[in-house]
Amino acid sequence: MNPIKKFILNLFASKHFLGSDSKLMGLLRADTILQNLIVERRVPGLAITVIKEGEVVFRKGFGYADLDTKKFVDPQNSIFRIASVSKPIAATALAQMVSEGIIDLDASFYKYVPYYPKKKWDFTIRNLAGHTAGIRGYRGTEYGLNQPYSIKESIEVFAADDLLFEPGTGYFYNSYDWVLISLAMQEASGIPFEQYVHQTVLKPLGMSNTFTPAPIVKSIGAEFGSENNKEFSTPREQTEEISSFYTKNRDGFRKAISVNNFYKLAGGGYLSTSSDIAKLGQAYLEKKVSNDSVLGQFLTSEIINGEPTYYGLGWQVSEDIKGRPYFGHIGNGIGGYSNFFVYPNEKMVFSILVNCTNPNVQDELDEIIQIFLTENFNDSLS
């Protein structure tokens, strides 16, 4: 049998495919690009989910969740570090808290966390969410911290440092902003951050494969006076689905260093699947989260000195090379790289997760997204 014909039969074996040759070749091209990332050892494993008009049009795993055991990636069950795609999850919870009147975006951060060291200038929750507060970013080895910090304990890493600029006059992207937001959310509500996220975002949206890192949960539980907080960490039966995490050098892939990301859950700590992240995007398209007046603030770029930052509140907000507006986030962390984009006009959601620190494949991922945006995919293929 012709190898291309055999490939196509395998790709669409579970579905009857009716459509143009253009559509077929588009899918073949997308699949080939992703498969080549594995063959060329550009990434160890990758999961992708694409939704159009509420239907999954492409969902597939490529490569390995674990290179040693040769366990294949499963896009519905393989769990990845999603890095900064955690920010849209946290932003969704913050929007809900704003809607409930528990927290005010324009209130001083000190209203909720009065014990934080005073700075030269005041700053608000909105400043933090839009990265215009002047909080510094990682220094030295902080990117790969492996300390058992609770959210509250972790502020000792950067709390003594001055602001980089007067809040509202500059933009500086970092994850410490969202550490502070999660702390303010805890203090304002009296509920552990991860518990509030679970109750208001993950559970209602059916994101049952999205978890906090497990090792630190007792610390945060103790901080709030409870014996444990296991409900919000990765259940034992799910741990076998957690992918191995890798970094890449000239000699190939190696296991990533051990890190403890619990303290920065809001900015980059969550674990999830490609399918779960796609559910979050679809919930936004279906307006299942918060209300339009609140969400509009989160999904609108901040303006600094008359120029857009292309960042809203926890969301990247921009246009692609064809001028199509989108919101979403790219994430890069130790052992994980992620793309999450929502195209409201096209009613499309893209969720791509890789189990490797920045593998330098963004050009290829951008090409994949453009293929799906260009072709008219109306049949569900998974």
Image (cartoon, rainbow, N blue to C red):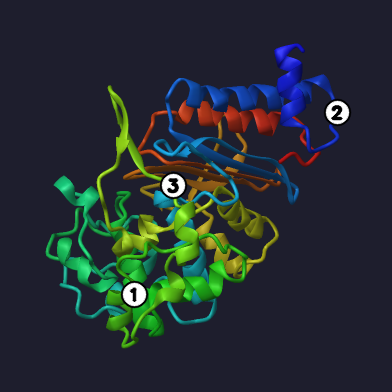
Q: Residue at x 51, y 37 (%)?
A: 46
Disc 3 packing (10 Å; few <14; some 14–19; many ≥20)? many
Q: Position of residue 215 (x, y in %)?
A: 31, 65
Disc 3: which residue = 243
Q: CA distance from mark 1 to mark 2?
A: 52 Å
Which quarter of the figure is the C terminus placed in?
Answer: top right
For this orientation, the residue located farthest to the left is: 160
Which of the numbered marks, if any, corresponds to residue 184?
A: 1
Which quarter of the figure is the N terminus placed in?
Answer: top right
Q: Residue at x 42, y 26 (%)?
A: 42
Residue type marked 3: Ser
- Residue 249 in view (yes/no): yes
Label 1 with label 2: CB-CB less than 8 Å: no
For this orientation, the residue located farthest to the front is: 69
Q: Quadrant of residue 75?
A: top right
Q: Position of residue 205 (x, y in %)?
A: 62, 66
| Vertical order, 325 against 249 (above or below) | below
Q: Residue at x 50, y 81 (%)?
A: 101
Q: Position of residue 52 (x, y in %)?
A: 72, 44
| Vertical order, 334 against 127 (above or below) | above
Residue type marked 1: Ala
Q: Which numbered disc flags the more N-terminal residue, 2 or 3?
A: 2
Q: Quadrant of residue 334?
A: top left
Q: Residue at x 70, y 14 (%)?
A: 3
Disc 2: which residue = 19
- Residue 108 in view (yes/no): no
